[in-house]
Amino acid sequence: MQNKREIGFEKEKKAAQFLQENGYKIITTNFAAKCGEIDIIAKDKDCLVFVEVKYRKNTNYGSPVEAVTFKKQKKISKTAIIYLRQNKVRTDFRFDIVSIVADNIEIIKSAFSMPAGRYYI
């Protein structure tokens, strides 16, 4: 039986493959900073995309998208700013979610925007 970490890694690989099949170019996976982690960073045409991957066996306890709470969005946003600073990137960017339920997978483009707050690039 697989543990949650192994399942998560497997689903992130599946998500990366799905993104590539849909024209995204993967830049890096599992970018970590003190404040959080971003599952996948990719390019979709000229836009930098920070991707959160969420998996559920079923929707009995809500959809994967519902699991990307305001608190999670804030962590992802802060981590994205760190990535942009470290790599001196100045480009358009957005936040997508790859939702996986059982064997169904979909991309939710521009799933959320940066929560209000102080962010400095």
Image (cartoon, rainbow, N blue to C red):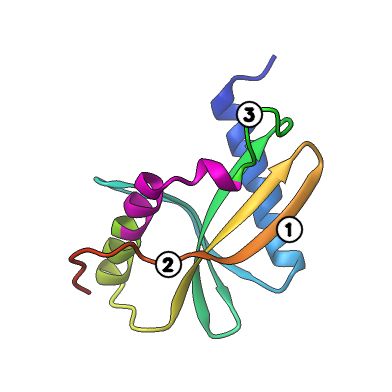
Find numbered disc 1 in the image and state the secondary structure of the residue it sits on. helix
- Of residue 20 and residue 67, the one placed in the foreground of this image is 67
Residue at 34 percent of width and 59 percent of height: 77
Q: Which residue is mark 3?
A: 61
Find out whether residue 17 is within the magenta segment.
no
- What's the CA distance linking mark 1 and mark 2? 23 Å
Task: Indicate whether 31 appears above or below 86.
Answer: above
Q: Which residue is mark 2?
A: 113
Q: Residues within 10 Å of mark 2 (few under 14, many from 20)?
A: few
Q: Position of residue 31 (x, y in %)?
A: 40, 52
Location of the N terminus (image quadrant): top right
Image quadrant where residue 109 sits: bottom right
Q: Is residue 68 left or right of residue 70?
A: right
Q: Which residues are magenta?
A: 65-77
The tag earlier along the polypeptide, 2 or 3, is 3
Location of the C terminus (image quadrant): bottom left
- Of residue 96 and residue 90, the one placed in the foreground of this image is 96
The tag earlier along the polypeptide, 3 or 1, is 1
Image quadrant where residue 71 sits: top left
- What's the CA distance linking mark 3 and mark 1? 25 Å
Q: Is residue 17 left or right of residue 75?
A: right
Task: Indicate whether 64 appears above or below 85.
Answer: above
Q: Position of residue 92 (x, y in %)?
A: 43, 82
Q: Residues within 10 Å of mark 3 (few under 14, many from 20)?
A: few
